[in-house]
Amino acid sequence: MATRIIPYWIVPVTLVHLPEIVALEQRIAAYPWQYALFQDELRAEWRQRSLHRVLLAPPDDRVVGFVFCRALVDNEWSLLNIGIVSELRGCGWGERLLRLVMRHSAKCEDATWLLEVAVTNRAARRLYEKCGLSVIGVRRGYYVSAAGHEDALVMQCLVRGNNP
């Protein structure tokens, strides 16, 4: 199912999108995911427990953003990766993508969201706080960085479901 937000489309990720997603990830991430990792996320056994979306721009439907999420157990979701092209950062597209998958995860019942973010990634931390996540802990040396390793903040929130 596609969601139209003029003039962009948000659609489920398919293998067709992966080359552009990987190219975008290579441009924006200090330690980017490789093609095989993205491809693994699209495996059949994960599909029922995943929410992977891509943001497409007209006129040629080029990939300008993506979000990869997976249910770990029951209704506990993890944000695995999110990215937006540099020219659209700060315009609210990352927030739209994240809120869309968070709402979708809680269609029928409450969903807990959990993620890690590098302590130094202030822009991502602000995005996650805007979407209702708050810090619940620290994972020491979680990320590889230019300085060796970097701590990650563990963030969590509860998204209320649409139960009658």
Image: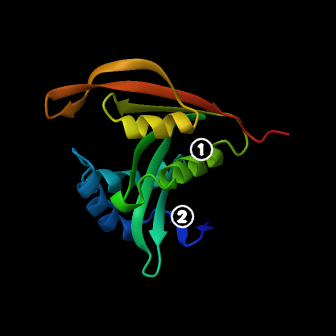
Q: Is residue 102 above or below residue 38?
A: above
Please give the residue where the numbered disc 1 appears in the rendered image: 102
**Label 2 Cα crowd, 10 Å radius (few <14 / some 14-19 / many 20+):** many
Work out whether residue 93 can be spotted: yes
Work out whether residue 2 can be spotted: no
Label 2 with label 1: CB-CB less than 8 Å: no
Left or right: 102 with respect to 54? right
Q: Can you give x and y, in whole percent of width and height, for residue 6 in the image? A: 59, 71
Given the image, on which type of amino acid does mark 2 rest?
A: Ile
Given the image, on which type of amino acid does mark 1 rest?
A: Met
Q: Which sits in the foreground, 133 or 102?
A: 133
**Residue situated furthest bottom in the rendering:** 59
- Secondary structure beneath disc 2? strand
Q: Is residue 35 above or below residue 111?
A: below
Q: Quadrant of the N terminus?
A: bottom right
Name the mark on residue 10: 2
Q: Can you give x and y, in whole percent of width and height, for residue 4 in the image? A: 61, 69
Say which quarter of the image contains residue 3. Answer: bottom right
Q: Can you give x and y, in whole percent of width and height, for residue 153 in the image? A: 39, 25
Q: Can you give x and y, in whole percent of width and height, for residue 48 in the image? A: 55, 50
Q: Give the mark nearer the N terminus: 2 vs 1.
A: 2
- Secondary structure beneath disc 1? helix
Say which quarter of the image contains residue 65. Answer: bottom left
Q: In percent of the image, x 26 and y 63: which residue is there?
A: 23
Q: Quadrant of the C terminus?
A: top right
Q: How is the image coloured?
A: rainbow
Q: In percent of the image, x 44 and y 52: which residue is there?
A: 90
Mark 2 → mark 1, Cα distance in angstroms: 14 Å
**Label 1 Cα crowd, 10 Å radius (few <14 / some 14-19 / many 20+):** many
Q: Is residue 8 above or below residue 27?
A: below
Q: In percent of the image, x 53 and y 69: which residue is there?
A: 8
